[in-house]
């Protein structure tokens, strides 16, 4: 009887331990395990792509794999946009003009766009990125309206009930560095991600996946929040092509964390972005999914189910069965300049996995005779490596800092001509 009870107890706790396993993230490099990455140049019939012409024919195959399994379809229809200039104000001692525009799609869905451009008549290159918690968080200027939709910044005292308060003005200004960009000759354009879709499982109800469903021709379940944000970034290119002060051939796309995932997906589908920056985009972004380190597929799809298709959840703890990995998403950005960045204090995003994601684009960039990361080892802190594909890991936490911006400006100056 005691033996049976002991066996039952051992079996029970073994089952419970297995049931709890998805809640445990591996943070031990020695436990990552072995994995084999799919070859981006290998076709389904086993043949290998050997030139850029064949790659450009084949890239649609990989896009379809991500669309069917992970991020969902992307709308193919162009929508009618109307824009209104809400305000134009000199800032930064006259060095820059701050613009606020309202853009309305098909007369049904409106967003607020913030632009900070150098105060000069010549066309300028711009950095474009979504923000998390409203345009007012990027600058203390009281003329910027407080964002009135759901935001994910509730851990900060400037936000209550997932809504921005007046105190939230400038709360994330360090992530934008407007003056630094102006002094370097660049403009900056931003929109709150929640203007396209609020970042929660029911966010689609007030977002473009619902309000513009008929016009975009997709059902809600056919795409994802990341897809909605990515579509929003492409729609910003449509808008910026109409702004005489902006050089629309030199739009540098950037994104931090989940918005870095959206930036990568946007650039994979839209080749008008001149260069792409992924700042700590982690799992579902630049980091390799097959690497068992930090946030994993199970955790991200259970914590944020709206970011991906439901079909992606089926690969939890079966990552090696995925038909792709994130290095292929990054390869779809070739031959454009790509910068992937990490932070030592952000192990959840798997810095080494982000580095390897960037490094394993080499085969595709080589088709264009563009230098990637080659065989360089994982670098030390604050020591950027690479050329057309670039990487750094800095000290500090999950954030977008002045150090990051200094590297991104240098990157843009060197490679966006």
Image: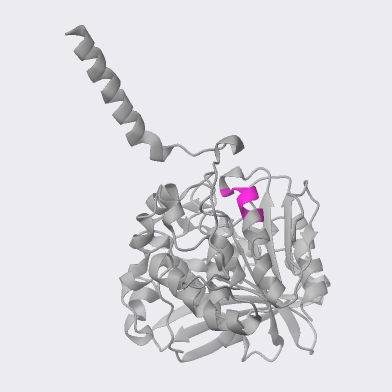
Q: Which residue appears at 41% of the width and 38% of the height?
A: 23
Would residue 249 be found to the left or right of residue 284 on screen? right
Q: Position of residue 143 (x, y in %)?
A: 61, 72
Q: Position of residue 53 (x, y in %)?
A: 62, 85
Q: Which residue appears at 76% of the width and 49% of the height?
A: 379
The residue furthest left is 1
For the stretch drawn in magenta, what is the main secondary structure?
A: helix
Would residue 398 be found to the left or right of residue 102 on screen? right
Quadrant that contains the N terminus: top left
Q: Is residue 203 above or below residue 238?
A: above
Q: Is residue 135 visible?
A: no
Q: Which residue appears at 53% of the width and 67% of the height?
A: 262
Query: Is 354 in the magenta?
Result: yes
Q: Position of residue 17 (x, y in %)?
A: 35, 29
Read off the magenta span.
349-355
Q: Quadrant of residue 305?
A: bottom left
Q: Quadrant of residue 333?
A: bottom right
Q: Is residue 226 visible?
A: yes
Identify which residue, 351 or 120, lies in the foreground: 351
């Amino acid at each position: 009887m005691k033996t049976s009870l002991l066996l039952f107890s051992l079996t029970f706790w073994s089952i419970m331990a297995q049931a709890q396993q998805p809640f445990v993230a591996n943070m031990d490099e020695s436990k990552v395990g072995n994995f084999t990455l799919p070859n981006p140049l290998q076709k389904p019939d086993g043949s290998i792509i050997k030139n850029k012409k064949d790659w450009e024919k084949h890239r649609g195959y990989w896009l379809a794999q991500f669309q069917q399994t992970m991020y969902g379809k992307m709308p193919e229809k162009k929508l009618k946009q109307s824009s209104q200039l809400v305000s134009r104000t000199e800032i930064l001692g006259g060095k820059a003009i701050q613009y606020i525009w309202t853009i309305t799609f098909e007369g049904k869905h409106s967003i607020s766009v913030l632009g900070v451009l150098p105060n000069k008549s010549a066309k300028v290159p711009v950095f474009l990125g979504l923000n998390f918690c409203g345009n007012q968080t990027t600058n203390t200027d009281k003329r910027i309206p407080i964002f009135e939709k759901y935001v994910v910044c509730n851990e900060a005292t400037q936000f209550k009930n997932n809504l921005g308060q007046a105190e939230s003005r400038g709360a994330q200004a360090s992530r934008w560095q407007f003056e630094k960009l102006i002094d370097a000759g660049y403009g900056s354009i931003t929109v709150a991600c929640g203007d396209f879709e609020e970042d929660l499982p029911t966010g689609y109800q007030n977002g473009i996946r619902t309000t513009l469903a008929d016009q975009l021709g997709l059902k809600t379940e056919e795409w994802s929040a990341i897809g909605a944000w990515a579509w929003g970034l492409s729609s910003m290119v449509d808008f910026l092509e109409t702004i005489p002060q902006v050089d629309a051939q030199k739009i540098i796309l950037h994104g931090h964390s989940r918005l870095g995932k959206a930036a990568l997906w946007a650039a994979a589908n839209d080749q008008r972005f001149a260069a792409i920056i992924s700042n700590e985009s982690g799992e579902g972004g630049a980091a390799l999914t097959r690497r068992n380190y930090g946030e994993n597929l199970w955790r991200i799809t259970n914590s944020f189910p709206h970011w991906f298709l439901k079909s992606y959840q089926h690969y939890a703890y079966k990552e090696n069965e995925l038909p792709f990995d994130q290095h292929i998403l990054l390869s779809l950005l070739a031959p454009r300049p790509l910068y992937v960045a990490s932070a030592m204090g952000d192990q959840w995003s798997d810095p080494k996995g982000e580095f390897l994601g960037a490094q394993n684009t080499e085969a595709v960039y080589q088709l264009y005779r563009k230098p990637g990361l080659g065989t360089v080892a994982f670098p030390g802190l604050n020591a950027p490596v690479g050329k057309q594909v670039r990487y750094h890991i800095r000290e500090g936490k999950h954030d977008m800092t002045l150090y990051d911006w200094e590297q991104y400006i240098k990157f843009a100056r060197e490679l966006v001509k």
